[in-house]
Amino acid sequence: MYRLDDETEQKPQNEPNAFLEEALFKARTIMLTGGVDDKLARRVC
């Protein structure tokens, strides 16, 4: 079958797995630059 448009249909991506999402969240690295005070440290952690 011929199509008039050049775009191909994309399948919708599945939602991220909750287990994988949590593992990636826990494995993240946060880098702070500049002055770090109590308020900033509390917001990040």
Image (cartoon, grey):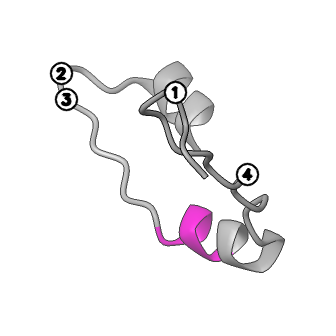
Disc 1 + disc 4, Cβ < 8 Å: no
Question: Which residue occupies 77% across, 72% down?
Answer: 17
Label 3 and label 1: CA atoms lie apart by: 52 Å
Within 10 Å of disc 2 (Cα), the crowding (few <14, some 14-19, many 20+) is few
Residue 42 place in picture, x, y as percent:
60, 33
Residue on which the image places disc 4: 12
Three-letter code for the amino acid on which mark 1 is drawn: Leu
Which of the two discs, 3 and 1, sits closer to the camera?
1
- Foreground residue, 44 or 6? 6
Question: Which residue occupies 71% across, 69% down?
Answer: 22
Residue 27 place in picture, x, y as percent:
48, 72
| Magenta stretch, main secondary structure class | helix
Three-letter code for the amino acid on which mark 4 is drawn: Pro
Q: Which mark is residue 28?
A: none
Position of residue 16 relative to residue 42, above or below, is below
The quadrant holding residue 9 is: top right
Disc 1 + disc 2, Cβ < 8 Å: no
Residue on which the image places disc 3: 33
Residue on which the image places disc 1: 4
Q: Earlier in the sequence, mark 3 or mark 4?
A: 4
Relative horizontal placement of residue 23, taking residue 32 as reference (left or right) = right
